[in-house]
Every structure is written in C-alpha cells, then in structure tokens.
Amino acid sequence: MNTIDLNCDIGESFGAWAMGDDEGVMPWITSANIACGFHAGDSSTMRQTVLLAKRHGVAIGAHVSLPDLQGFGRREMKVSPNEIYALTLYQIGALAAFARAAGTRLAHVKPHGALYNMAARDAALADAIARAVHDFDAGLILVGLAGSHLPRAGAALGLAVAHEAFADRRYVADGSLAPRGIEGAVIEDVDTAVAQAVNIATSGNADIRTGGTLRLHADTICVHGDRADAAAFARKLREGLMAAGVEIAKAR
C-alpha cells in the first residue's frame, strides 16, 4: 500500500486579519506547516496553531519564508546563502519555542512561496536551508519540491527528507511548478485537484500543463490553507486518496 503524508500551509492569520479555516482543515491533515511571522502569522497565531495541531495529533513544522508580509512571501528577493541560513534558523527557533512551551516539538521544516521555488533550483540556497535545519536539530525532516535541489541538499547532510507534490498546482516539464501568474497554474476545481493527487500517489505521474506526463515520486502532498474551500478540499483529498487505497500517515 502506498503511504502519503498530507501537509497544509497553515497559521497564516495576522493581527486582526484572518486567513483560512485552520480548525476546519486540521482534522484531515497529518502535518501542519505553520507560518513563522515572515510571510504571514504572528506570535499569537503561532501559539494557537501549535496548540491546535497538538490537539489533533498533527505533526508540527516551521513554514519559513523570505521577509515579505506585503507580498505573502511570494516575491523573490536577492539574498545570499548566509542570509538565508540566518533567516531559516531564526524562524525555526521561534516556532520551536512555542512547541516546547506546549509540551511538544517540531517535526519538520518547509520553505514557503518564493523561497521554496528559489531553493528548488538554486543548490547554494538549498544547502543554506538544509544546514540551518541540520544545525538546529538533525532529527527534523526537510520538506521540498520532489526531485529538486532542496531534498537533495538535506539528504547530503544526513537529514530525513520528504519529497513534496501538489494537488492543486500545475507542473511544467522540468518538474517545477507553473508560475502563479500563468493562467491555469492553480487548479481551482476540487475534483480535478483530487484526481491529480491520486494519480501522483498511485502511479507516480503528473500531467504537464502544456501536455505530456511527468514522473514524480512524492512522500507528501500539500493542501494550501489559503484556499477559500481549504477545509472541504482537505477532506475530499483525504477521502479520495483513501478510496484509491493510499494510506494517510505522517512523514517519517
């Protein structure tokens, strides 16, 4: 039986501004990537989301980002590997403090948005992130785009890694995600997104946006918590995968 972790980018509310339905999503996922205040989230939201994940037995991860609240972390910046190392370590430490205070611990780290895509294609940035994770806690899992530089950098340092795929994003031929600015890059229809996830989990294939098929090994599949229908999407995704014979379990 194939096994897949379902992770969600979550805890993205900030101050009086609310995003997503974290309580609605949490029962359906196995791993939570909690925003650490750089692209979204704040100290109160981080604490609340850690406690919510603990209550549901969901693995807690730091969702680290470039410092870009205005752009939701989706704008690329010119940054050095040393800067990325420090930014990553800073955010991991912040979320780890809330986890420790709640009597639990971090399980994984996943970059967000532009940082995620930059680390997927830039070996030096990938290595900086991996070194920050390793230096903080070599027992953490590093999550990155399937087959990209980031999981390779983590594995090279002896970290456990999780190759990630996306249910609701289109792929291009080199295995990267179609940029969000391109029409159709985000799959809005839930049934279509679930079908893509099932195809990835059961056959190791994903459709390329412009035609053809991409071979893709995935350990974890992402649910975007900023979707308006995130809770319903997470439920249907879990149910669809289980109906196809896929076991849902935390990444190891």
Image: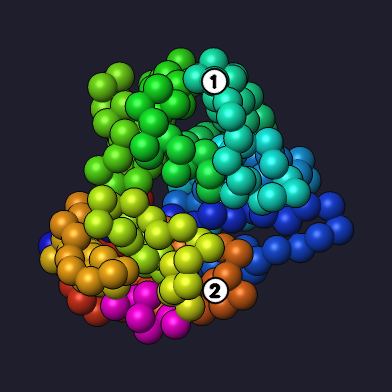
Quadrant location of the N terminus in the rendered image: bottom left
**Is 222 placed left or right of 35 in the picture?**
left
The residue pinned by badge 2 equals 231
Q: Is residue 101 above or below residue 10?
A: above
Return the x and y of residue 8 as percentages of the image width and height. 49, 57
Give the structural element (helix, strand or loop) at label 1: loop
Q: Is residue 180 above or below residue 228?
A: above
**Is 96 placed left or right of 156 in the picture?**
right
Which amino acid, by three-letter code, is at mark 2? Ala
Of 136 and 75, nearer the camera is 75
Q: Mostly what secondary structure, the magenta segment? A: helix
Numbered label tally: 2
Q: Quadrant of residue 79?
A: top right
Give the structural element (helix, strand or loop) at label 2: helix
Return the x and y of residue 141 as percentages of the image width and height. 37, 35
Q: Is residue 89 above or below residue 186?
A: above
The residues tagged by marks 2 and 1 sit, at their Cα atoms, a distance apart of 37 Å
- Magenta stretch: residue 190 in it? yes
The residue under the point 29% across, 47% down is 146
Magenta residues, as a range? 189-195
The residue pinned by badge 1 equals 80
Quadrant location of the C terminus in the rendered image: top left
Which amino acid, by three-letter code, is at mark 1? Ser
